[in-house]
Image (cartoon, coloured by chain):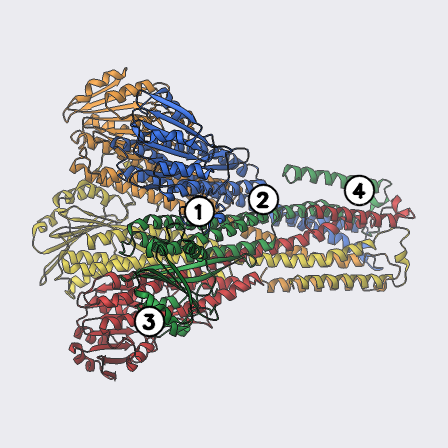
Chain colours: A blue, B green, C red, D yellow, E orange
Amino acid sequence: MVRFIKRISKKAGLPPGTLVHIGEKKAETVRIRLMDYTPDHLEERDLSAVEECFPYRDKDSVTWINVDGIHQVDLMEKLGSHFGLHPLVLEDILNTDQRPKLEDYEDYLFLILKMITYDEAQKRLHVEQVGLIVGARFVLSFQESEGDVFEPVRERLRKGKGRIRKGGLDYLAYALVDAVVDNYFLVLEKIGEDIEELEEAVIGKPAPETVESIHNLKRELLFLRKSVWPLREAVAGLEKGGSSLIQEKTVLYLRDVYDHTIQVIDTIETFRDMVSGMMDAYLSGLSNRMNEVMKVLTIIATLFIPLTFIAGVYGMNFKVMPELEWHYGYGLVWLLMILVTLLMLHYFRKKKWL
Amino acid sequence: MVRFIKRISKKAGLPPGTLVHIGEKKAETVRIRLMDYTPDHLEERDLSAVEECFPYRDKDSVTWINVDGIHQVDLMEKLGSHFGLHPLVLEDILNTDQRPKLEDYEDYLFLILKMITYDEAQKRLHVEQVGLIVGARFVLSFQESEGDVFEPVRERLRKGKGRIRKGGLDYLAYALVDAVVDNYFLVLEKIGEDIEELEEAVIGKPAPETVESIHNLKRELLFLRKSVWPLREAVAGLEKGGSSLIQEKTVLYLRDVYDHTIQVIDTIETFRDMVSGMMDAYLSGLSNRMNEVMKVLTIIATLFIPLTFIAGVYGMNFKVMPELEWHYGYGLVWLLMILVTLLMLHYFRKKKWL
Amino acid sequence: MVRFIKRISKKAGLPPGTLVHIGEKKAETVRIRLMDYTPDHLEERDLSAVEECFPYRDKDSVTWINVDGIHQVDLMEKLGSHFGLHPLVLEDILNTDQRPKLEDYEDYLFLILKMITYDEAQKRLHVEQVGLIVGARFVLSFQESEGDVFEPVRERLRKGKGRIRKGGLDYLAYALVDAVVDNYFLVLEKIGEDIEELEEAVIGKPAPETVESIHNLKRELLFLRKSVWPLREAVAGLEKGGSSLIQEKTVLYLRDVYDHTIQVIDTIETFRDMVSGMMDAYLSGLSNRMNEVMKVLTIIATLFIPLTFIAGVYGMNFKVMPELEWHYGYGLVWLLMILVTLLMLHYFRKKKWL
Amino acid sequence: MVRFIKRISKKAGLPPGTLVHIGEKKAETVRIRLMDYTPDHLEERDLSAVEECFPYRDKDSVTWINVDGIHQVDLMEKLGSHFGLHPLVLEDILNTDQRPKLEDYEDYLFLILKMITYDEAQKRLHVEQVGLIVGARFVLSFQESEGDVFEPVRERLRKGKGRIRKGGLDYLAYALVDAVVDNYFLVLEKIGEDIEELEEAVIGKPAPETVESIHNLKRELLFLRKSVWPLREAVAGLEKGGSSLIQEKTVLYLRDVYDHTIQVIDTIETFRDMVSGMMDAYLSGLSNRMNEVMKVLTIIATLFIPLTFIAGVYGMNFKVMPELEWHYGYGLVWLLMILVTLLMLHYFRKKKWL
Amino acid sequence: MVRFIKRISKKAGLPPGTLVHIGEKKAETVRIRLMDYTPDHLEERDLSAVEECFPYRDKDSVTWINVDGIHQVDLMEKLGSHFGLHPLVLEDILNTDQRPKLEDYEDYLFLILKMITYDEAQKRLHVEQVGLIVGARFVLSFQESEGDVFEPVRERLRKGKGRIRKGGLDYLAYALVDAVVDNYFLVLEKIGEDIEELEEAVIGKPAPETVESIHNLKRELLFLRKSVWPLREAVAGLEKGGSSLIQEKTVLYLRDVYDHTIQVIDTIETFRDMVSGMMDAYLSGLSNRMNEVMKVLTIIATLFIPLTFIAGVYGMNFKVMPELEWHYGYGLVWLLMILVTLLMLHYFRKKKWL
């Protein structure tokens, strides 16, 4: 549940723009990495102090500053004020309970994204919020902890392959968003495998645990949907928002990311439909089995109860019971019992229970 | 139920603009508090008579008059006529069964908000309606009773911290709306904890009370949704309505509140989905257990009914029953019984009931 | 059902504009009441012949003609042709199976409303269609029978209180619509009480009748919704339609009615959600009780069936049954039975059935 | 099912505009009827050859050519080419699996309608597709078989009553559409009666057949909805499409048909809601009865199982059973049994089962 | 499941525009077929090398190049660069997990379609992605494997029948899209037959396999919907997008395809409704039968349990049991038993169980 709504009690009542880190402190130390490049040149550094990145703000080259760990409020404040970020932007970056969104502050674009990984053992989604600032000369990215989906982008920058070194700031921003969205497909793939497995379990040999798994999957899909759904609008805003920071030629690429986002949402909805269909199938399977159990019980009980009654009658100890004296009494009782049984079986066959 | 629709019978048929207090009388006496401030100066007073606040109407400073208790109709009328409020506005403030809304009366904006608290013991939401008038030189706020979520705003005004003393009337209005919306997160947090608890109960050891709790939670979420959903439109109206009373620089802040409202609504919907998923999980758990009970009954009954029949047969008192005379008759019957039992067990194993 | 679709067979195939009364004939005789007023003067008359109202058509004063009973087709035709109503309008007034709607015929506005009352004994809604014509100098209202929700409006006209005598034709029309909508709250209030009662029944001591009540309530809410939902659009049309018959200052009042309509719809939807939630709660309560019944049966049967079998075994009449001869045989059998019982109880405790 | 999707296999792969009749051949021969009229004059003819109607194409009078039976492809082709119909239009007329729609081909309007009848014995809807061409000087109507809902329109034309003879081509088209829509009310009336009947059955004495009836009704409503829903858009297109073929004064009448269409759709949706509510009521009634059956079984079994056990114990044949020797043994056992029974009854009363 | 989300892991992290084939390799070799035509002339060739089609790019005639098999990335690259395709377009063609869509690249239109076949034995849908490029002088179509629904189009081209040879590039594109959509009707027809069959099974003799079939059908419909739904927007884009590559006269034809697409979607939704209605009918049928089984069990058990108890009583071996000594004891017991039975039967009749 904590994942659906974070404890923001410590913040309630503070003036807007007050910087409070909301969320788990996922990283011990803060790591600041800088990549500065032109088509021909690349500088990559790990900064020990935040001030080291300040000179890059006004350089003509593309500068990407990535911050892993957002819990050091003073550091964030320094960065924010040097790069001219609005207090509300900083506040949103620190509050990891934001919905994905795009805000256009004219000098820069501010994006909130959710980086999602799927813990296959626990069958749980983990989410990490990414804040992205796309300015005229720099891109800032803020993450909750080290380890991310941006490594391939870095690799491409290092190798200078493709259009990434020539593409400018907006292309870099696109590449980062694309990396996040591409990652969703990996998550969906794994969830898809779980659904497949569960589906077989439902049809094959349903167990009480199956319900729990379905319920769990349902909740994770709800969670995933909550994290991805608003992204659609944000990416559409990037593509169609007409910000001067986005070049015409990048728009084609953004349309591609938009398509991917739609596809992710589509697949989530399909998965949700499938999972809820599985619940129905499970329940009707359960009813089926119950029905079968009941039938067996009824047949056995209905066959033997009258017979037992007959046996009971002739077990009575009345002084005067003529049948008991008959020579073929015992045989006749067996005949009677067989007759009753045959009648019963006929009745069951007529009812289509056998 | 009373919470979903209030008794307005006493008002039916009266002409519009007739002032009738609809709702519980929550406060005994009416308390009027005034805060008047400029960036450098702050005056805070508790008024003993409503007339004391009249001179502040035309002062250039920002004046915030807060009224706790709206049941004194004549007092409300005096205030309303002095500050030039339309009779329909006053009527709406007094009728605590309003939906959240924004109305632009050109000279002033009129807002209806719902202040919500969650009674953790009773697991019930309590709601208090707040009417907000944002004029050119004054802000009026009307509450049903003392005790509110505005205390932090007052505190910030007293300390002169942040931008609040410099921000003007619209910023004050923003701060009040923000305080109300921020409070929703606290409510959601507590409901979230209840959901978490209930979820564990559903999976772990479901009891009949669980249904009642789920049903109750469902209703409270319905109630919460009814109180919050229309707020979205109202806040969007503030942000995008283009009222001359809202300064350009405040719009950024209103966008922030709007985001929060969306997030609240989003979380309510997610909670609703989760609660209805819990109901399904509970019911299928119930079916599971029922199925198990039935299986045990069927196995026991099916095993012993034929055996009891056999015993019954040889309990009959016929004169002539050859088996009874056999020396190994008793032993053979035991053999027969064991055989029948083994056959039954084999059948159950084939059916996967064991 | 008759309430959901009326018998219009008698009309099928007739040319449009043919006047046929569709609906029950609720009033015996037709009563025509006229109120003619200016701010200073009021004339109230019961007309014995429809022609008596004709001279009022062109008077500058505000004339309100109310017709109770619409089944006299010729009378309706005379009225219609004198006041210049389109044949389709007359046809719609006579067909009481209309949806609420607003039509702008330039010279006049035509409104269809539904006047609803709740029969608490039968728990049934009764609906009466009201047709309203708002012309430049007259307001015509047509009802199916005497007895309506307009009495308070008449009272205010008589007393000359409030703005009603000065407000003009559009204000009178507003007052009539407002009276109809206000009345919905009374209906909702009563339904709300029924829901509250039913809710307690569902949680407390559900009986088979409860289902019927829930089902009935569901249907009445469906019916209510069908009658109110389209009203929203009609009232919005009045407010925003820009008809020259509606003065600027009346728009504020119409906005108020619009708000009320939204609130009514909102409450109906909430009620529907609650009632369908109650059905779920009822069913799961039923399952719970069934489960409990099954458990008791299973425990009793499972405890005694093996014991009865043991008793049966030693009730057999074999000549040679060594145990029967043992001195402590009987005691040992009791011991065996107690042992079996304890084992069973242990098993049930493990299964958490006890 | 055949009703939901028709066999179009024979057409797949043919070029567009290829004329293939898709649907049942409902009429043996093709009948062509012509009505040609001005306000003062009417000519009505049954044509033996399609060529006979060609001269009417360019006459100033209003010409209505009605074709019953569309399976003669060559005849259709001749008609189409003489009246200048686009091949796609002809193709659509012949394919009876079209959705209702309106297409504006500038020279003429093309409408697809569904004429529906309800077979009360079989409780099945029958549908017949009507293609309507509204040109500048002629109206063409194509039906699958003889027998239609247009007879009243013809009668009005013959009698020259109402505005129909003076109304022009667009008014004739309106009258035809109106006849089709009016007929829906008759169908709804009959379905409404069936629902009413079923509702009583559900509450009163539900039988397994009830489910089948509900299921059947559900499917017919689905089918009806599929045939009517798209009509709304088509009629709105007629009213608001601004075609030069529709005169200003006819628009009022079209608005009336539009209202009726909305009302039909509304009623279908309400019926669907009611039918699905009936299913719920039926199922919960079933559960109720099941619960009752279980209770009776449990009470009987639970009362007698222990008693039977006691009797079994004293039916054992042990040599040494002291109780058997007691003089009051038998009486005491009866006492014991009565005691057990009373205890049981007390328990059941506590559980509220009695 | 693999069908709902394809393994794209191998692609994650690569720069956009990197060509990777995602999907099964369905064809062994790649086959390139070329059709080049003017109204009078047609050239049809199977190309052995991709370069052979290059000269056709700039010819004035209409050139249609169809590629069966998209897994040879280098070949695709050559084609793409010669015909001036954007890298993102090529990437999308190779990734067979795309949603249907239309993209306007000004020089050419890019369409993704899904070609669907229904495997009747396995009751499974198979899907093949088709990429379509509509340039100014050429149409390129890319399929995953040989065998398609375009054969009738080729046949029409060969025979020069209809408007296809005169219709230009946009008409060819229309014909291809039309062929794909027409094929959906065949698929729907087969699914419709399966639904019909299943419906009979549900009403007639439901078996546990029925649930599985319903569940399966549900999933296939979900899958079909996912493949067809987005096509609507794509075709609407073709019709209304105003691309200069689409001639005015082709728009009418595209409207026709659009209508068909809507009809397909409509039918899918109706099928989904029907299938989910079948599930309900199946479950309630199951409950019905369960109820009946329970009733039989209850009646039998309730009849015989008291009788067996009576027999048990008189099977007890007490020394002193006066009834046993009576001369008519045995007869009286039979009388008692018959009385009890009659009472029971009366009770059952009152309860309407018989």
Residue at mark 1 shares a chain with residue at mark 3: no
Identify the element where label 4 is drawn: helix
User: Looking at numbered disc 1 in the image, what kind of residue is underneath it?
Assistant: Ser
Q: Tell me the quarter of the picture where residue C282 sits.
A: bottom right
Q: Give whichever of discs 3 and 4 has the lower sequence position.
A: 3
Residue at mark 3 shares a chain with residue at mark 4: yes
Rendered residue at 18%/24% (across/down): E37
Which residue in the protein does label 2 denote?
A: A289
Mark number for residue B17? 3
Q: Nearer the viewer, mark 4 or mark 2?
A: 2
Q: Tell me the quarter of the picture where residue A224 sits.
A: top left
Residue at mark 2 shares a chain with residue at mark 3: no
Which residue in the protein does label 4 denote?
A: B333
Query: Would you place residue C7 above or below residue C287 in this image?
Result: below
Which residue in the protein does label 1 denote?
A: E276
Q: CA distance from mark 3 to mark 4?
A: 94 Å
Identify the element where label 3 is drawn: loop
